[in-house]
Amino acid sequence: MDTNIIQVLAVSIATFGVVYITIPLLIKVAYLKDLYDKPDGERKLHTRFVPTLGGIAIFLAFFIGYSITGVASDFGGYPYFSAAMVLLFFTGMKDDLIGLSAAKKLGVEIIAGLLLIFGTNTYIGNFHGMLGIHELPFIASIGITLFTMIVVMNAYNLIDGVDGLAGSVGLVASLFFGIGFYLAGSPEMAAMSFILSISLLGFLVYNFKPASIFMGDTGSLIVGFLLSVLAIRFIGLNEVPAYTQYFGLSSPVIPVAILIVPLYDTIRVFYRRAKRKTSPFLPGNDHIHHELMRIGLGHAGVTIMLSAYTIIITTLAASISSMNPHVILGVVLITSILMFPTNGTKRMILSKIGLKFEFGPNNVDDIHIKSKAEKQEDLKTTSEPVS
């Protein structure tokens, strides 16, 4: 067997194994120390006490897996990249365990972004003709790159509200990024993408309905950060002939298609709350996954539908990548508006179709807070398998 294939298999097994072995231990520790997320009967869509430490396993698996690939050193400034990840990891941990203000979290995200920009030379320096813009002044590049990172990290965090959803969307997104980087001849970025997808696959074993663990802010910050890095690096592929022979000059648009679910949801929530004159930064039950739950889809149904949307829209964008990037962007946006259940008519059609996956409460309004006795029984039965 080819040595490269053996190495890929070994790294994949090791990465998956770290998640698979670590999560049961984290679940046990979480229940022993009362480190779990409590249902609130309103915004949160779970009815059980669920640990939020899954991000620890994702972080460890990615860090170990990527470090042993043999190509991590090809990522210029890898120590700075690692420092940014570690900083976000401990920030997420603090938020999961004792809470952290949004302002402090934003400050850490900016520091992590600056470490990435100046330490690894990762920034958006050229729009490649999108919106009539080509090369950017360096100061503008820094601002746009930081803005992109913060938007992607927080948008990804906002979709982490249904069992399996954030993990599945992250898995699909990282796979698409990986394919693009592989075809472009960028092994260090392809490896980063695929190691992330394997880490999320191991996490999803424990996160599908009924979830026995959540990724928490630790996981959403780390995964959101990695997806933002992949997106920023992907935008620069228009300068790589190996990429353009497959996908033309589409590199500024493809990341939008790949991350369409979190981006569309965030823009939609900001727009709706601006109309209502309410803060877009407060928790709420007006995200796309809440809307889908209200029309009868269960956790699995929401996850499958939104993951499928990502696949369809990204595949569509890639299939017309030889066209003008502005046309591709227009097709992506129009398709998203037509597909996502963002108005009453589309939600009514879906509800009449009766598309349901019966894996627990299918309606946001059906969720209730359990009694103290039910909670005690929940803790007992949930902790038994990992004792």
Image (spheres, grey):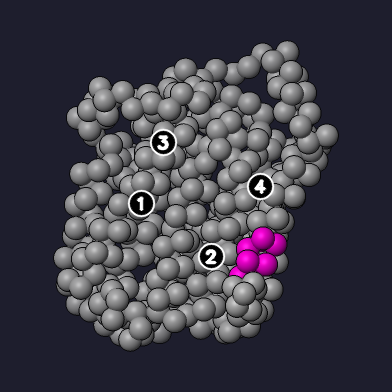
Of the image marks 2 and 4, the number of the one nearer the N terminus: 4
Q: Position of residue 167 (x, y in %)?
A: 52, 48
Amino acid type of disc 2? Phe
Of the image marks 4 and 3, the number of the one nearer the N terminus: 4
Q: Position of residue 332 (x, y in %)?
A: 24, 57
Depth check, mark 2 against mark 1: the one in front is 2
How far separated are the C-alphas under marks 1 and 4? Answer: 23 Å
Q: Is residue 372 visible?
A: no
Q: Position of residue 105 (x, y in %)?
A: 58, 56
Amino acid type of disc 1? Thr
How far separated are the C-alphas under marks 3 and 1? Answer: 12 Å
Of the image marks 2 and 1, the number of the one nearer the N terminus: 2
Residue bearing mark 3? 302
Work out which quarter of the rendered image holds the N terminus and state it.
bottom right
Q: Is residue 253 visible?
A: yes
Of the image marks 1 and 4, the number of the one nearer the N terminus: 4
How far separated are the C-alphas under marks 4 and 3? Answer: 21 Å
- In front here: 335 or 318? 318
Mark 3, secondary structure of its residue: helix
Question: For the residue carrying disc 2, how many other residues have a C-alpha within 10 Å: few (<14), some (14-19), or many (20+)?
Answer: many
Q: Main secondary structure of the magenta part?
A: helix
Question: Range of the magenta residues?
Answer: 8-15
Instruction: Confirm whether the magenta stretch covers residue 134.
Output: no
Question: For the residue carrying disc 3, how many other residues have a C-alpha within 10 Å: few (<14), some (14-19), or many (20+)?
Answer: many
Residue bearing mark 4? 54
Work out which quarter of the rendered image holds the C terminus and state it.
top right
How far separated are the C-alphas under marks 2 and 3? Answer: 24 Å
